[in-house]
């Protein structure tokens, strides 16, 4: 190499080193506050690396690698940058000791890599790569929530039920997640196909299996090869056709039927649930404080509605929200939709991005003595749901055939929109 080449190489190396030093200094100057945790401090060490198309595959898919990759288009001069850094750096400070490595990918610069990993343009998302599996995190960007979720990732995509502990794990998820369980011969090709299909939805759908006749009987599985899907708040499972026995067929069946009629909003599924529905879906938000008499009564009514409308899975989506679990969001939601959540249960057909909704008139229900009025309460709610599914209650203001909405009630508090009621 001639003198010019050596000089160029030296300058390039120096620039890279200066860039790394500059990044380290910025990270060292980062001030992260974690209120409520007086002894928790960020130690100032940068534990993240930038990945590009050139080094991505060999890094995250290396043998025994456990990688957390944050795909984002946040630049250093963005106002959000420090918040993202605090979230990532504290999570890394805890989890690098447990074998995880943390990386970032700039989706504006790495377009082909973004497309390869199926990240939408402008989307910020987190993927975890572990034991050859890719798991997407849909929860809030809070270090406590994320680290807790990361520690709970199972070692295997399918839990084999063969003792009471495994059975309790399956039963405890009854209203918390979509669950799938199958009965297979141990070590069979069909079980392998089932496990490979489960890899696609790790972190979103819980897969279980039994491999003995005794455990199959306890769980109501009658034949080898039988696969059942349980939706939250619904009593009866869905049965996979007997023809479904390959990875691709399992994946297609799961994708087609995985959407429940009702699911609960949690810190872990927030970004998977709080979003606009598909074009042919209707989204209903239900705010129910389960610690109040009225909220508990509404919750029990909605469980019956979800079960009785199971045929609408995929076209009707009810999101159950306990405001006590999201205290910081109550004011936001009240201003967004012009409702009073603290007044009592609220139920509305909504458009999340447009921040609008048509809200059910709760006065049609008797929630003070719900047992005595179960039938009339269910009839009123079911009539409202039927009107939504038929299109006679709709957020589409351009529909000339749609009846005029009732006049808005006067606002209950300053700076809140009046709510529509039907």
Image (cartoon, helix red, strand yellow):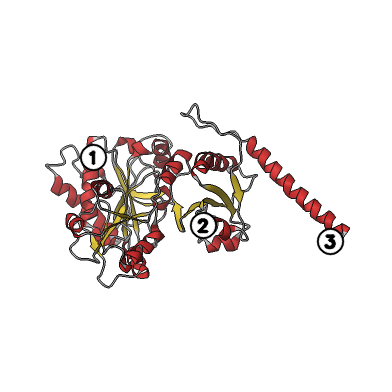
Q: Distance between the residues labelled 1 and 2?
A: 49 Å
Give the structural element (helix, strand or loop) at label 2: loop
Give the structural element (helix, strand or loop) at label 1: helix
Between residues 210 and 268, which one lies in front from this camera angle? 210
Q: Is residue 15 above or below residue 183?
A: above
Between residues 68 and 61, which one lies in front from this camera angle? 61
Answer left or right for 330 relative to 216: right
Residue 94 at what x, y percent from top left?
Answer: 50, 39
Do callouts 1 and 2 mark residues in contact (Cβ within 8 Å)?
no
Q: Crowding near pointer 1: few (<14 within 10 Å), some, many (20+)?
A: some
Between residues 385 and 49, which one lies in front from this camera angle? 49
Residue 355 at what x, y percent from top left?
Answer: 43, 49
Answer left or right for 366 relative to 348: left
- Can see residue 397? no
Furthest-bottom residue in view? 243
Point 23% across, 57% down: residue: 309
* Residue at which label 1 appears: 296
Q: How far apart are marks 3 and 1 (CA)?
A: 78 Å
Q: How far apart are marks 3 and 2 (CA)?
A: 36 Å
* Residue at which label 3 appears: 1
Point 25% across, 71% down: residue: 242
> Of label 1 and label 2, which has the lower sequence position?
2
Point 26% across, 64% down: residue: 185
Q: Crowding near pointer 3: few (<14 within 10 Å), some, many (20+)?
A: few
Q: Crowding near pointer 2: few (<14 within 10 Å), some, many (20+)?
A: few
Residue 302 at what x, y percent from top left?
Answer: 24, 48
> Of label 3 and label 1, which has the lower sequence position?
3
Where residue 63 is drawn, which disc sits there? 2
Residue 117 at what x, y percent from top left?
Answer: 52, 61
Q: In which quarter of the image is the N terminus?
A: bottom right
């Amino acid at each position: 190499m001639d003198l010019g080449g050596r000089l160029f190489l030296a300058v390039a190396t120096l620039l890279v080193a200066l860039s790394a030093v500059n990044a380290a200094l910025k990270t060292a100057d980062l001030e992260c506050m974690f209120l409520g945790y007086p002894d928790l401090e960020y130690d100032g060490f940068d534990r993240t690396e930038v990945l590009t198309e050139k080094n991505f595959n060999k890094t995250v898919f290396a043998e025994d690698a456990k990688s957390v990759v944050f795909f984002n288009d946040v630049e250093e001069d963005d106002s959000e940058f420090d918040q993202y850094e605090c979230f990532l750096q504290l999570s890394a400070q805890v989890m690098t000791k447990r074998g995880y490595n943390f990386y970032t990918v700039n989706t504006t610069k790495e377009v082909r890599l973004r497309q390869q990993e199926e990240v939408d343009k402008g989307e910020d998302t987190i993927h975890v790569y572990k034991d050859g599996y890719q798991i997407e995190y849909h929860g809030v960007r809070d270090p406590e929530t994320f680290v807790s979720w990361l520690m709970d990732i199972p070692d295997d995509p399918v839990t084999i039920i063969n003792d009471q502990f495994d059975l309790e794990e399956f039963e405890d998820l009854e209203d918390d997640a979509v669950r799938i369980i199958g009965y297979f011969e141990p070590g069979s090709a069909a079980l392998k196909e089932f496990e490979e299909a489960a890899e696609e939805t790790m972190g979103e759908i819980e897969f279980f299996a039994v491999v003995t006749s005794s455990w199959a009987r306890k769980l109501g599985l009658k034949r080898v090869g039988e696969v059942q899907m349980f939706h939250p708040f619904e009593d009866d499972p869905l049965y996979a056709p007997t023809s479904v026995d390959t990875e691709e067929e399992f994946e297609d069946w799961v994708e087609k039927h995985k959407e429940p009629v009702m699911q609960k909003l949690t810190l872990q599924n927030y970004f998977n649930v709080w979003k606009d529905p598909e074009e042919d879906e209707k989204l209903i938000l239900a705010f129910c404080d389960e610690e109040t008499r009225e909220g508990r009564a509404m919750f029990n009514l909605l469980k019956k509605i979800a079960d009785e409308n199971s045929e609408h899975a995929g076209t009707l989506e009810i999101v159950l929200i306990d405001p006590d679990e999201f205290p910081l969001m109550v004011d936001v939601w009240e201003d967004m939709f012009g409702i009073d959540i603290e007044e009592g249960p609220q139920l509305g057909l909504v458009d999340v991005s447009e921040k609008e909704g048509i809200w059910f008139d709760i006065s049609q229900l008797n929630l003070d003595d719900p047992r005595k009025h179960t039938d009339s309460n269910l009839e009123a709610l079911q009539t409202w749901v039927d009107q939504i599914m038929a299109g006679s209650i709709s957020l589409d203001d351009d529909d000339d055939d749609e009846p005029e909405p009732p006049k808005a009630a006067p606002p209950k508090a300053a700076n809140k929109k009046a709510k529509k009621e039907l």
